[in-house]
Image (cartoon, helix red, strand yellow):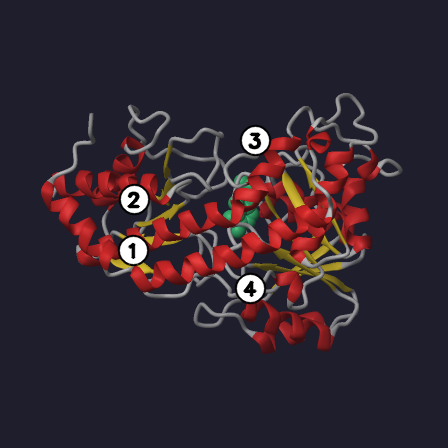
Amino acid sequence: MSLQISERVRSLAARAQSELREQFDRIDAIAEVNTQKVLAAFQKHHVAESYFAGTTGYGYDDLGRDKLEEIYADIFGTEDALVRIGFVNGTHAISCALFGALKPGDILVSAVGAPYDTLLGVIGVVDKGPGSLKDYGIEYRQVELVNDAPDPEGLARAVQDPRVKAVLIQRSKGYSTRSSLSVEEIGALCAVVREHNPNAAILVDNCYGEFVEEQEPTQVGADLVVGSLIKNPGGGLAPTGGYLAGRKDLIEAASMRLTVPGIGRECGSTLGQNRALYQGLFLAPHTVAQAVKTAVFAAKMMELLGYATEPTSDMVRHDIIQMIHFGTPEPLKQFCKGIQFGAPVDSYVTPEPWDMPGYDCPVIMAAGAFIQGASIELSCDAPMRAPYTAYLQGGLTYESGKLGVMLAVEELLRSE
Ligand SMILES: *Cc1c(COP(=O)(O)O)cnc(C)c1O
């Protein structure tokens, strides 16, 4: 048995890989530093078989759950953390953080343009039903990008109002065209907020960024980081969930939104999933490196074929996302089809663009994952509008990610 990959694509792949040695060494070095961090935290907290047992029902006294939260806090360098399978996704975790940090009359500022699409309904920028921050009398302001880059002067002006109680910084680009922020850039934005409004809580949407660098935003001034467990920190094993790590008061307030005021973090059974969350976290630095290598490999392959990529294959990475600009709809669709054909699950289906809720144009999504929607697994999606850009991410192993990209290129070349 072997995959149908032509000599042309195989030799292109060999060339791409041979030219990436330096990049791969850099990525592996970061994985080693982060693995050390994780391993040290596991040892400090005496992780043992008994932590994996878990609870049912109310979930009182779930030792493994509570210890995992201490471990997350250590890894992110924070006072506290909340790591729960009860978060249905990253948006839910971010929403709890926002509702916890803000009260009626307060103002939320988004520091780098519009936030991720699903947060528009949470904030109330678009009406997606009742219960948004806006419905509760919380105002929203947004610092627009200047030439697709953060605007520190604009941020300084926006946060000066003492009613600004929370500032949201999104690390990854989402479906925007700006670059993802480095941890260093996030640190610079945090310094601006601190200087002009020391009372505002700085919340970072950390989705897709965890373990890509040696430091996390909470180590350069952020008060809280939030993310999804079916992305980087779940290591491909967490079946669902989200996390927050940061200041104790912000974690406590968010926990009251996850469950209810008065109960907060005391409840939340783990239903036998503690082991998956521990093992996933243990693997996460390595898994993230696999995804970053897959992204870099995809960039190099497409560059050799004459396509524009972002970031380019030689750039230092700040998240696991790879953009590929196709310019026209057909090659984009062919590429996504090929990614789907390369998946371990659902490889026999053909992705088609569809009108996804919350988007203003059809979106095509290729994913064949063990965990539904897990984008730490190889996946590719694209809004079907100019400049016809694919957003590729994930790859549980570099080998499988590489093969997926080779099959996508095969599909692309077949239709040329
Ligand atoms: C994935 C993601 C989210 C959360 O999305 P969910 O699908 O709700 O997990 C938020 N922000 C960014 C930048 C993301 O990439």
Residue 248 occupies which quadrant of the picture?
bottom right
The CA span between labels 4 and 2 is 32 Å
Amino acid type at circle 3 is Pro
Crowding near pointer 2: few (<14 within 10 Å), some, many (20+)? many
Of the image marks 3 and 1, the number of the one nearer the N terminus:
3
Instruction: Say which residue appears at 30% left-offset and 50% top-offset.
Output: 388
Q: Is label 4 in a helix, a strand or a loop?
A: loop
Of the image marks 1 and 4, the number of the one nearer the N terminus:
4
Amino acid type at circle 4 is Val
Query: What residue would you read off at disc 3?
Result: 239
Query: What residue would you read off at disc 2?
Result: 402
Q: Residue 112 bears which disc, if any? A: 4
Of the image marks 3 and 2, the number of the one nearer the N terminus:
3
Instruction: Say which residue appears at 71% left-offset and 56% top-offset.
Output: 139
Q: Is label 3 in a helix, a strand or a loop?
A: loop
Number of on-image labels: 4
Please state which of residues 413 and 21 is positioned toward the viewer in this rendering.
Answer: 21
